[in-house]
Image: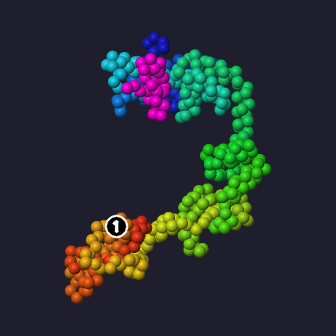
Amino acid sequence: MEKGRKPFKMSKDLSKLVKKLASDNPELRKHLVPLLKEAVVPIKQMAKKASIKTVEQFGLFKVYGPYTDIAPLIKSLKQWGFRYEPVHKVWEMPLEKVTPALRKRLDKLIAKQTPWEDILQQAVTNGWVLSFVYNEELIQDARKLKGTWDKKHKYWVFPTARAYKEMSDIVKDKEDILNEILKKKEGYLQQKKEALRKGWFVQFDYDTDLIKEAKSLNGLWDTNQKVWVFLDISDYKKMKRAIHEDDDKDVPSNAIVRSQSSKNKTPRFQKGDSFRDPENHKVLTVFNIMSKYYAEDGRSFGLGMDRGWAHSFYCKLAGKKGVAEVELQEFKELSRQQMVKAYQNMVKMFKKKGKFPKPGSKLITLRGKKHMESDTSSILYGGGHWFVVESGKIWYVENNGADGDNWAHNNIATSGAGALGWYLPYSEGLAEELKIMDKKL
C-alpha cells in the first residue's frame, strides 16, 4: 500500500467478484491481488486456536479434531506413544502413561497450530483460488496439492502460493482438453433438457444392477429431478424394458393392481403401506410400485390427463399387522356417535367371545389399568362397568354388588360384593382403541 493511503471498504459480493476475476484472468491478477490486500472486507472472525480437543475417558487420554488441524501433530503423537483408533477417529494413550510434562508439551504444540479455516481465509484473500471443468485427474491433482473445494463459491482454494501456481500450470497445460469437455458438457446439457421435455427418463429404487444398465446405455443422472435421462429414444426404451423385467421378477401373477393418476411424481402410497381397498373393501399391502411419466397424450393411455404420472401399485392381502394398522386409523376417524356404537359392539363381543372364569371361593383381583369407567356414584352402590387392561388379558367388568343382585355369580373382586368379568387375550389394537375411547367419550 502506498504511504499515507488509507484502506478502503469492499463489500463481500464485490470481493467475491474481484477474486473470481483474479482467478479467471492471469493477466489481471497482478493488479487485482494488491487491491484485495488493501481492501477491508468484513469477514467472519475465526477461532484463534485450532479446534483440537483432549479428553479423559475410560482410562484413556484422547486427542481428536478435524484432520486438517490435527495432521501437523501426527508425527509427534506417534513418537510420544499415541495410537490411532479408526472407529472413533481419535488418538489415544493409557491415562497412567500421560505425565504432566507430556501434557504440557501437547498443550504447547496444540496452541501453536493455526486453524485450517484461517489458512483458507488468508488464501482466498490472496486470490489463491481456481475454478475448472469437472475432471477426475484435475481433482486428484488439486487434492495432492492440499486444495480444498469450497461448495458455496464453487472453486478450489490452495493454502500456499506455490500450490496455487502449480495447479494453475496443470490447468493451463490441459486447457485444450478442458475446453473440449466444456463444449461437450454444454451440448449434453442442451440434449438432456430436450430429452426431459420429451419424457425420455426413468425412475427406480436404488438397485446396483439397474444403475449399471443405465450407465451402459449412456444414461445421465439428473440430481434435481432424481431421474435417469437418456439422449436416445432407443436407449430409453431398452432401459424401460430392463426395469419392467426386473419388476416382473417380484410381481406374482395373482397380484392385485391398483392405479393412481397424478401431476406429482411422488405416489400416494409407498412400499409396505396398507390401505382399505374401495373396490373390495379388503385391506391391501403394497409390495411394489411402478411409475411412468407421460409428457403428452396421457389420456390415450388412461391417465385422465394429457401430461402427468401414472402410478401402479402391486398389492397383496394385508397380514394381521397391516389390517390392525388400518383398522386403528379408521377407528380414530370415527365420529362420537359412531364410537358410541363401536363401544356397545365391543361390550357385546366380550360377552359373546370372552371367557368367563367360574366363580370360586376366592374372587379374582385385577391389577391392570382401568378404561371407560362409568360414574363412581353407581360403582359405590354396586353398579357400573369398566375395562381393565393387564399384561396378557383385557377384561370387561360389570359390577354386580347392588341389593337384589345374585352375588353368587361374581368372579371379580371389588371394594364391595364383587363383579362379573369376561376376558379376551391381550391385543395391542384393542388396547389402543380403549385409549382413544377414553379421550373421545
Residue 6, quarter of the rendered image: top left
Q: Which residue is mark 1?
A: 390
As displayed, is residue 270 above or below residue 215?
A: below
Report the residue at 56% width, 72% height from top.
282
Q: Residue furthest bottom?
A: 404
Residue 108 in view in this figure:
no
Please say whether residue 74 is one of the residues in the magenta stretch: yes
The reply, left or right, for residue 13 in relation to residue 196 is: left
Report the residue at 28% width, 78% height from top.
360
The reply, left or right, for residue 329 in relation to residue 438 is: right
Say which of 223 and 9 sits in front: 223
Say which of 365 and 243 sits in front: 365
Residue 251, quarter of the rendered image: bottom right
- Report x, y in % for residue 228: 68, 47
The reply, left or right, for residue 391 in relation to residue 281 is: left
Name which residue type carries label 1. Answer: Glu
For the image, the number of numbered tags is: 1
Q: Residue furthest top?
A: 3
- Report x, y in % for residue 155: 58, 29
Query: Which quadrant holds the C terminus?
Result: bottom left
Query: Which portion, as a residue range, is magenta?
Result: 67-94
Please say whether residue 441 is one of the residues in the magenta stretch: no
Q: Residues within 10 Å of mark 1 (few under 14, many from 20)?
A: some
Say which of 91 and 423 sits in front: 423
As displayed, is residue 374 above or below residue 68?
A: below
